[in-house]
């Protein structure tokens, strides 16, 4: 069955460092991969979308890579700040008109001053 | 409103009762999703509506769960004969198309079955 794996352990880093989160998938050939941020008690908020024919996408301090051979996406936050502390979720969708969005379990990031 | 609206925000119900959760998506969005999130867990897919197509119900955990979307807009998720394991936050999201576009989430309905 389709499986999306994100590191269940929290990632603790020092302010100013680069945070790197991993999303791996199996039994799936997604055409689209998205990253969301979720704060406690709130719904997820969209950050970035990357397509299967794109290797890398950037938005301000965020960078996403998508390696369809490794079946992996990496999500980077450069110059991290305590305000970046949240849970980050990856989500995948196949191509075609009936392409529902399936989420991983998320990784909690804690940025310490 | 400008965003996805869910009601109620909190619901406490007795075991065995039926509950209805409502979602008002963003106007014009053809795709609508329901997810369930238990404490400290990820988003569990429940059901997906896309335009006039038959919904993808593959994530519904049992036949006690059902959902409908009227007029391609408002959606209602119904849980019959609630059980304690149904306690969770139920999140609704809409997007302009499907998984190739950004999804906008509501604040969720926290359901507690006592």
Image: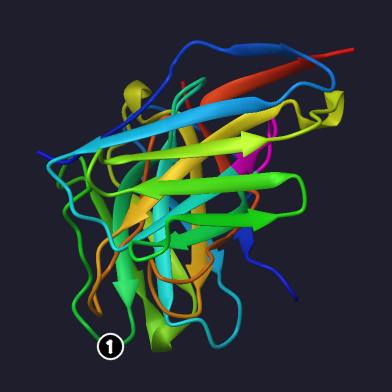
Residue A39 belongs to magenta span: yes
The image shows residue A81, relative to residue A53, as above or below, that is above
Q: Is residue B41 above or below residue A27?
A: above
Front-most of B13 and B55?
A: B55
Q: Does the rendering let one see residue B7? A: no
Q: Which residue is mark 1?
A: B52
Q: Nearer the viewer, residue B69 or A63?
A: A63
* Residue at x 51%, y 21% (from the top left corner): B39
Q: Residue furthest right?
A: A113
Which is the main secondary structure of the residues drawn in magenta?
loop
| Residue appearing at x 26%, y 57% in the figure | A30
What residue appears at the point 45 percent right and 24 percent down from the top-left corner? B41
Residue B42 image offset from top left, x and y in percent: 43, 31
Give the crowd class for mark 1: few <14, some 14-19, many >=20 residues within 10 Å: few
Magenta residue span: A37-42
How many numbered marks, from 0 up? 1
Q: Mark 1 falls within which chain? A: B
Q: Quadrant of the C terminus of chain A?
A: top right
Left or right side of A85 for B39: left
Residue A111 image point, x, y percent:
77, 18
Secondary structure of the residue carrying tag 1 is loop
In-front residue for pair A47/B111: A47
Instruction: Name the residue rendered at 32%, 72% in the picture.
Output: B49
């Amino acid at each position: 069955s389709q499986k999306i794996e994100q590191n269940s352990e929290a990632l603790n880093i020092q302010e100013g460092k680069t945070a790197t989160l991993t999303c791996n998938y199996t039994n799936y050939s997604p055409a689209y991969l998205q990253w969301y941020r979720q704060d406690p008690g709130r719904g997820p908020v969209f950050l970035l979308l990357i397509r299967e024919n794109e290797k890398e996408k950037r938005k301000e301090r965020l960078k996403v890579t998508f390696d369809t051979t490794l079946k992996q996406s990496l999500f980077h936050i450069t110059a991290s700040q305590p305000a970046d502390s949240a849970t980050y979720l990856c989500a995948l969708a196949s191509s075609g008109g009936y392409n529902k969005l399936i989420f991983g379990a998320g990784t909690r990031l804690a940025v310490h001053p | 409103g400008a965003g996805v609206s869910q009601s109620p925000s909190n619901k406490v119900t007795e075991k065995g009762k039926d509950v209805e959760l409502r979602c008002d998506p963003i106007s014009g969005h053809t795709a609508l999703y329901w997810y369930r999130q238990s404490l400290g867990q990820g988003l569990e897919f429940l059901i997906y509506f896309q335009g006039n197509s038959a919904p993808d119900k593959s994530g519904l955990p049992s036949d006690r769960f059902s959902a409908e979307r009227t007029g391609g807009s408002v959606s209602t998720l119904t849980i019959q004969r609630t059980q304690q394991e149904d306690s969770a936050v139920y999140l609704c999201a809409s997007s302009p198309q499907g998984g190739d576009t950004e999804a906008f989430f509501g604040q969720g309905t926290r359901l507690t079955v006592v």
